[in-house]
Amino acid sequence: MRIYTTATITDLKTVKKQGAFIAEAWQRQNRVQVDVRAIKRIGNVTPEIQWGFIVLESMFGTYLCHYEYGGNVHDGIRLVVTPERLMSLDSPAYLACPERFLSMAEVENAYWRDCVRCYSAAVKEVTSETVGDSATVFLLKGYSQREYGEPFHVLQKDGSQWFGIDCYRSKRPVNLSLGIIQEHCPSLINVQLQKPFESANLADDCVDTGVLIYKEHCNRVTLLGRPMTNHEIAQARLSMVPRVTFELHGECPWAA
């Protein structure tokens, strides 16, 4: 469960003090003594508003968490500690976990970890230089825009304009920055190198956008490949037609 408590400005003076206070709060709520194995402050807006990631260790195991201090000195500085199993894609702050922290604790949220790694790679690889004027991008976290009913997991760039392609193959213009795209865990896709699938043979939980095909499961998506072209479909069906071998036998009149 999440930990909610309040701290004083003294508890936030150093990252070491922040970690010690989090360990004490964990012990009070869970009745398990923990030590701070690692802590990394990611955000530091003001002395009262800071957040990051922490790895706590006890004799029973290790726990990877996100922590956030917020509020003000007069009303009390609230601390929220979120364990890995409760971290989702709802908050971009959850994606900035240092990759080395992932190896320090047992896996409790495999999908979140996949998204963290995707986000970390995207910050380096999905840049204005690599995107250029033409690109296809697949998003692990769907992008939603108020005027459109369905989220987009497939984006395409044409010149300076981005377009989202929804589950109905509708192509809609979207206005978003590269930073927002990175927060949605993108991967640059070479469509021609994707595995081809015939749309008619797809399962009900698969979505064919006309550009890429992905599978949906419990609000999670997995890229499968791309739709077959008409030529590929024709070739595939021809390859399934049995070949008939004609043999001439001596007893046939025309074989004399």
Image: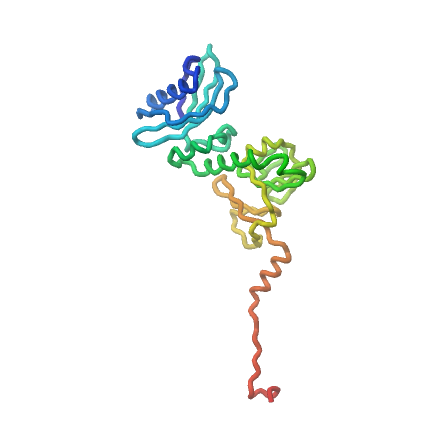
Q: Position of residue 182 (x, y in %)?
A: 57, 33
Task: Give the vertical position of 220 relative to 204 (above or below).
Answer: above
Asked whether, in this view, residue 103 is left or right of residue 242, the answer is: left
Identify the residue shown where x is 56% and y is 38%. 186
Q: Position of residue 125 (x, y in %)?
A: 57, 37
Identify the residue shown where x is 31% and y is 24%. 33
Depth order, front residue of 244/186: 186
Say which quadrant the N terminus sits in: top left
Task: Give the vertical position of 28 relative to 150 (above or below).
Answer: above
Asked whether, in this view, residue 177 is left or right of residue 47, the answer is: right
Residue lying furthest top: 74
Identify the residue shown where x is 46% and y is 25%. 52
Q: Position of residue 243 (x, y in %)?
A: 57, 71
Counting labels gives 0
Identify the residue shown where x is 52% and y is 29%. 92
Task: Give the vertical position of 110 relative to 229 (above or below).
Answer: above
Examine the image and state in which quarter residue 108 appears.
top left
Say which quadrant the C terminus sits in: bottom right
Task: Give the vertical position of 155 relative to 94 (above or below).
Answer: below
Q: Position of residue 107 (x, y in %)?
A: 40, 37
- Please say which color scheme the image uses: rainbow
